[in-house]
Amino acid sequence: MISTSEFRSGARLELDGAPYIIVEFQHVKPGKGGAFVRTKLKNLKTGQVLDRTFRSGEKFDEPNLDECEMQFLYASGDAYTFMDTSTYEQFTYDKRQLGENTDLLKEETVVKILLYHGEPISVELPTFLDLKIAETDPGIRGDTATGGTKPAVLETGAVVKVPLYLEAGEVIRVDTRTREYVERVR
């Protein structure tokens, strides 16, 4: 159980049968009347953010969340197979359950999967991934002075913007939080 007095940014609670994380909170003690807590909550399953106000002293259940370190093995259509790195058990999840960055997943990448009652609700990728450019338009000579970018399709199928001088076959580092090119890997 978690009480409103224990609310902190990042604290997790279960509300209306769904897991939420506290994004912002503010304890308010008006001149008259009871104290209350204003919160901004993010639904961990849907990503929806809502504002809720709670009376001081209310209690909530903590959600049944497990964080597992797993290695991505392979994808077959919309089915993604992972191996738990501690038990070597294999699990197959649907692409919709894993979030929006599944197109950056490369075989053998170790990720953290957040499970809610055994069902995945999010995948946390490493901050930086080194991926090979599968295809991109050739750079035009003399076009690099402008610092322009062009789209590049990576080995995983993801599309990111890269500098004009990069060519297919080169390995680049991608920031998985912003999906942006960071640097060329030599």
Image (cartoon, rainbow, N blue to C red):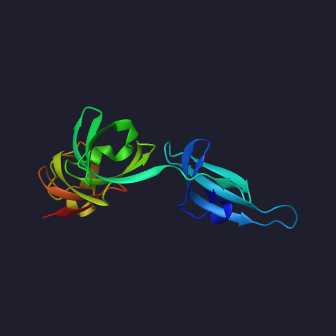
Quadrant position of residue 99? top left
Most distant residue in the top direction: 77
Q: Position of residue 154 (x, y in %)?
A: 21, 47
- Viewer-proximal residue, 118 or 25? 118
Which image quarter holds the C terminus?
A: bottom left
Locate the N terminus by quadrant.
Answer: bottom right
Q: Quadrant of residue 69?
A: bottom left
Residue ID at (72%, 54%): 54
Residue furthest right in the image: 32
Question: Which residue is rendered at x = 49% and y = 43% of the image?
Answer: 45
Q: How many marks?
A: 0
Write the residue at 17% across / 50% down.
133
Q: Nearer the viewer, residue 96 or 64?
A: 64
Task: Say left or right for 109 vs 99.
Answer: left
| Image location (x, y in percent) of residue 31 | 86, 67
Looking at the picture, tell me which residue is in the foreground, 126 or 59: 59
- The x, y position of residue 71, in whole percent, is 25, 50
User: Is residue 114 visible from the viewing direction of this image?
Assistant: yes
Side of 63 where 161 appears, left or right: left
Picture coordinates of residue 32 (x, y %)?
88, 64
Q: Image point 37% across, 56% down: which residue?
A: 178
Q: Is residue 66 left or right of residue 22?
A: left
Q: Is residue 152 visible?
A: no
